[in-house]
């Protein structure tokens, strides 16, 4: 019965995506839903940006191992990203009427910067998509006994299909429905488990105080590691296409800004539920904590709850993961088609051809991520790795490009190149004892400032791009 419910849910999602596809007439509709989403759809889309496998599986697993201190990256860093994007970036980027974040680099710094930034922006999404597919493969494995790799392939086919036909319209509408299911499913499970445990107080009484430590010890290495954990998603996802496309799909600049704040509050609130549920599991069923702790929650639900709770929980899990995956597939596809292939074609593609090129790119990135998902299985690591490259290469050129008129194209290019080279050296060659993103980001900023000051001032062109 549970498996039939999951199949029915997947089928319903595909139907919603097919219905939404009727609104897709242009590449702009496909990438940004025609920039027309109301506050409810826009907020739910932003909330669903990261609320997937890393929050329900990865973060709860890390929380059981290291307490609150181990999950600074997500959910706290993710909520920080949405707040910062709403304060400093959403309104300014919305007024420029861009299709992709790569368009900003083209408009502000020129064609070479567009190509380089896009080449750095798109590939990391493969790991992020793979993390979500691994999670769905794990769910199908627990529920049906299907091999994880087979579950990955089935999940990829479903999500890719409705993303391929409906683009951002399908993503936004399914995100809204899925967000409701996420909240209801997790709340019901939390209430049921808290009741079995004898109440919330009984659950927390069984937790060692050290598990609630939130601040670092006053030691240099721990402080830098703490700041790096906040930064991986908190700063690293600011220059990302998925946050950009969800925010820019809003119907107005005010809606874009407000939806960031609403989504941040909703994300941080709802993300506490998987952590609390993991505490309930530890209190009630400590034997479940052996082996792969990523499977702790689904196995516990399957073995110790009734069918109604199982349907709600696995429905919310699938909702969370599918909403994240679909957007993550569309993001690099949009960058690849609009900012890498189109310039190489000398702008000869019309809008209809661009639409089909973007759809083809959806298939490409989905296939690459499916292959990676079949080879690797640690969800939290896959997600963290996917955000670092954007931070060390694109954060400085994006931020200074908006707020410092003296930033030059040469400075932006130097920032990106120095950032990626220094990160690679610190990550794979030189051991410096701190997270590689710290020196790489610092050197990226320094390179931008120095080269911009040493090169001639350029006219700033930030007028709307797509009329």
Image (cartoon, rainbow, N blue to C red):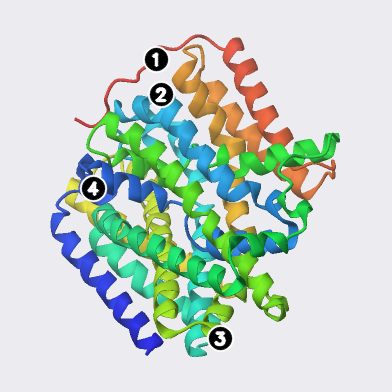
Residue at image coords 67%, 79%:
288
- Left or right: where 361 falls relative to 22: right
First in sequence: mark 2 or mark 3?
Answer: 2
User: Is residue 364 visible to the viewer in this orientation of the structure?
Assistant: no
Image: 126 above or below 134: above
Residue at the (39%, 38%) spot, across then down: 260
Q: Which mark sits nearer the N-terminus, 1 or 3?
A: 3
N-terminal label among 2 and 4: 4
Question: Which residue is label 2 attached to?
Answer: 108
Comparing 164 with 412, the one in front is 164
The residue where tag 1 is placed is: 460
Mark-to-mark CA distance, 1 and 2 = 7 Å
Separation (CA) of disc 1 from disc 3: 61 Å
Q: Are marks 1 and 4 in contact (CB under 8 Å)?
A: no
Quote the CA–CA distance across marks 2 and 4: 24 Å
The residue beneath circle 3 is: 303
Q: Which residue is mark 4?
A: 33
User: x, y percentage for residue 279?
Assistant: 64, 65
Measured as percent of width and height from the top left, residue 117 is found at: 49, 38
Left-right relation of 260 to 232:
left
- What is the C-alpha distance between the residues marked 2 and 3? 56 Å
226 in relation to 292, above or below? above
* Viewer-nearest of discs 3 and 4: 3
The circle on residue 159 is: none
Q: Secondary structure at mark 3?
A: helix
């Amino acid at each position: 019965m549970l498996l039939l419910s999951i199949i029915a849910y997947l089928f319903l999602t595909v139907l919603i995506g097919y219905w939404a596809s009727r609104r897709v007439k242009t590449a702009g509709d496909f990438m940004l839903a025609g920039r027309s989403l109301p506050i409810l759809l826009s907020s739910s889309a932003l909330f669903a940006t990261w609320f997937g496998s890393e929050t329900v599986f990865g973060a709860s697993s890390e929380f059981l191992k290291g307490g609150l201190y181990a999950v600074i990256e997500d959910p706290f860093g993710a909520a920080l990203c949405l707040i910062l994007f709403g304060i400093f970036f959403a309104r300014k980027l919305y007024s420029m009427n861009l299709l992709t974040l790569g368009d900003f680099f083209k408009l502000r710094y020129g064609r070479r910067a567009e190509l380089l930034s896009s080449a750095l922006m798109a590939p990391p999404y493969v790991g992020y998509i793979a993390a979500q597919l691994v999670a769905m493969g794990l769910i199908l494995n627990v529920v049906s006994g299907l091999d994880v790799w087979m579950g990955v392939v089935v999940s990829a086919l479903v999500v890719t299909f409705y993303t391929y036909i409906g683009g951002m319209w399908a993503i936004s509408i399914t995100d809204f429905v899925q967000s409701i299911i996420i909240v209801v499913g997790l709340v019901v499970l939390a209430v049921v488990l808290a009741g079995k445990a004898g109440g919330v107080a009984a659950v927390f009484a069984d937790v060692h105080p050290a598990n609630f430590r939130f601040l670092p010890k006053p030691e240099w290495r721990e402080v830098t590691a703490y700041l790096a954990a906040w930064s991986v998603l908190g700063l690293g996802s600011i220059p990302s296409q998925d946050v950009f496309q969800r925010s820019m799909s809003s119907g107005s600049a005010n809606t874009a800004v407000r939806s960031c704040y609403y989504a941040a509050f909703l994300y941080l609130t709802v993300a506490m539920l998987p952590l609390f549920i993991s505490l309930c599991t530890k209190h009630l069923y400590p034997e479940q904590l052996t082996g792969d702790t990523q499977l702790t929650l689904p196995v516990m639900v399957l073995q110790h709850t009734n069918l109604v709770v199982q349907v709600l929980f696995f429905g919310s899990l699938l909702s969370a993961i599918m909403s994240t995956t679909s957007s993550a597939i569309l993001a690099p596809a949009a960058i690849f088609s609009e900012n890498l292939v189109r310039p190489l074609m000398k702008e000869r593609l019309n809008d209809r051809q661009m639409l089909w090129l973007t759809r083809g790119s959806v298939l490409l990135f989905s296939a690459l991520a499916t292959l990676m998902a079949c080879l690797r299985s640690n969800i939290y690591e896959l997600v963290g790795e996917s955000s670092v490259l954007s931070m060390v290469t694109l954060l400085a050129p994006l931020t200074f490009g908006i707020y410092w008129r003296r930033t030059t194209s040469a400075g932006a290019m130097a920032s990106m190149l120095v950032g990626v080279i220094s990160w690679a050296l610190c990550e794979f060659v030189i051991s410096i004892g701190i997270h590689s993103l710290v020196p790489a980001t610092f050197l990226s900023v320094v390179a931008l400032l120095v080269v911009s000051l040493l090169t001639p001032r350029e006219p700033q062109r930030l007028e709307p791009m797509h009329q």
